[in-house]
Image (cartoon, rainbow, N blue to C red):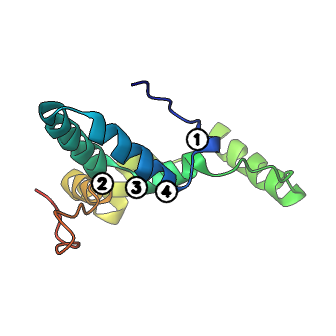
Amino acid sequence: MSLTVPSPRTTPPARDRLSRLVAFYAELPDDAAALAADMLEVVARRYDAAGTAAALAPDDDEPLTDEDRAAIAEGMADAAAGRMFSLDEVMRDLGVTGAQLADARAGLEAPTVARDRDDTTAPRA
């Protein structure tokens, strides 16, 4: 069995991907199927929907406007003049702790994974 990974720009529709996944799974011996299910669960838990959507989004082929160029120049001038703030400074000014930031990030990185069809809202531990 050979696995061909499509490029992000030619990813087949979801039903085709599911059919391929089921076909690969059906060919596996029981012990490998159990391992594959565990691995897929790990992938599902770590799946970053926003990051993936951004990676698969079409290239922005619109030309820069004069307003865009002015905003870029302003940002570059601010950076050159030292008018920037570090993440630590912003967090301190907003009263956000490192633990709060880590909790927020963990919430974004851990999507809900359904245990079965009857339990579609409970996050997996």
Q: Marks 4 and 1: CB-CB under 8 Å?
A: no
- Of badges 4 and 3, nearer the viewer stands 4
Q: Position of residue 110 (x, y in %)?
A: 26, 55
Decide if residue 27 is on the left or right side of residue 51. Answer: left
Mark 3 Cα-neighbour bin, 10 Å: few <14, some 14–19, many ≥20: few
What residue is rendered at 39% in x and 25% in y? 1
Q: Position of residue 107 (x, y in %)?
A: 26, 60
Q: Which residue is mark 3?
A: 90
Name which residue type carries label 4. Ala
First reached walking from the N terminus: tag 4 or tag 2: 4
Distance Cα–Cα, label 3 vs label 1: 35 Å
Could you say whether the residue bearing mark 3 is in a helix, strand or loop? helix
Residue 8 is labelled as 1
Name which residue type carries label 1. Pro
Could you say whether the residue bearing mark 2 is in a helix, strand or loop? helix
What residue is rendered at 34% in x and 56% in y? 91
Distance Cα–Cα, label 1 vs label 2: 25 Å
- Of badges 1 and 2, nearer the viewer stands 1
Q: Which residue is mark 2?
A: 105
Q: Which residue is mark 4?
A: 14
Name which residue type carries label 2. Arg
